Image (cartoon, rainbow, N blue to C red):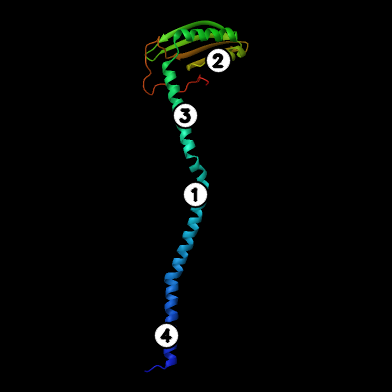
Amino acid sequence: MKLSKREILLVAALFIIATFTVLYLYFWQPLSAKKLSLLQEIAQLETTIARLAPWEAAEQELHTAIEGLKAKLTASTEQRELGIPLPEFLVMVEGAVSTSAITLQNTSLHVTEIGGISTLNISGSYQSLYRFLSILDEQDQALVLESLQFAGLENNLTGLLRVRLFSGAIIGEAKEGGYPTRSLFTPRK
């Protein structure tokens, strides 16, 4: 069977159309869909980058701030480990007692393997005891508050204050990981 010229052109046109249809359906359309999904992903990543750009710009500033905080922590730890000598502690307590108008009933010192614990028996009104603790808090030396107990009424409170001293006058070293570097009475700088 011999095909005429018109039939050959028709078959060739159908073959070309079928070839382009197959190429479009199996190659071009999946590639364009993949391209579209990749463009959407790029747009999402660009918004994420735009959101994170200020943080990246502030990285050096944050790094400097972290290093400064580490230096302050080291200085605070070294200062706490140096401690406050016992005579200075007693003078500081006497000054706080006289300023705040409380009564210091007695003071004791118990030496442990890690520094020493000074126990202060105090009494006074709520306001005067609050003033006393505020004065101790404002001191440059760091004190480690072990315990604080109060009993009584607002105008007649008695309290028991236990403070740990790391002093050159008291032999003993803190065990590694034993006491926190930040105490309730941290120095104000």
How far apart are the two marked residues, 1 and 3, measured between alpha carbons? 28 Å
| Residue identifier under label 1 | 49
Sequence-first tag of 2 and 3:
3
Kind of residue sitting beneath label 2:
Leu
Q: CA distance from mark 4 to mark 3?
A: 80 Å
Q: Residues within 10 Å of mark 1 (few under 14, many from 20)?
A: few
Residue 141 x, y percent position in the rendering: 48, 16
Compared with residue 20, is residue 92 higher up or lower down, i.e. above or below? Answer: above
The N terminus: image quadrant:
bottom left
Q: Residue at x 48, y 43 (%)?
A: 56
Q: Which mark is residue 69?
A: 3
Foreground pick, 181 / 122 = 181
**Which callout, 2 or 1, points at the residue further toward the start of the chain?**
1
Q: Are dots 2 and 1 in contact, CB under 8 Å? A: no
Earlier-in-chain disc, 4 versus 3:
4
| Viewer-closest of 101 and 54 | 54
Name the residue carrying label 4.
12
- Are dots 1 and 3 in contact, CB under 8 Å? no
What SS does tag 1 mark? helix
- From the viewer's perspective, is the residue at label 2 or at label 3 nearer? 3
- Measuring from the top left, give residue 172's x and y in whole percent: 37, 14
Q: Which residue is mark 2?
A: 133
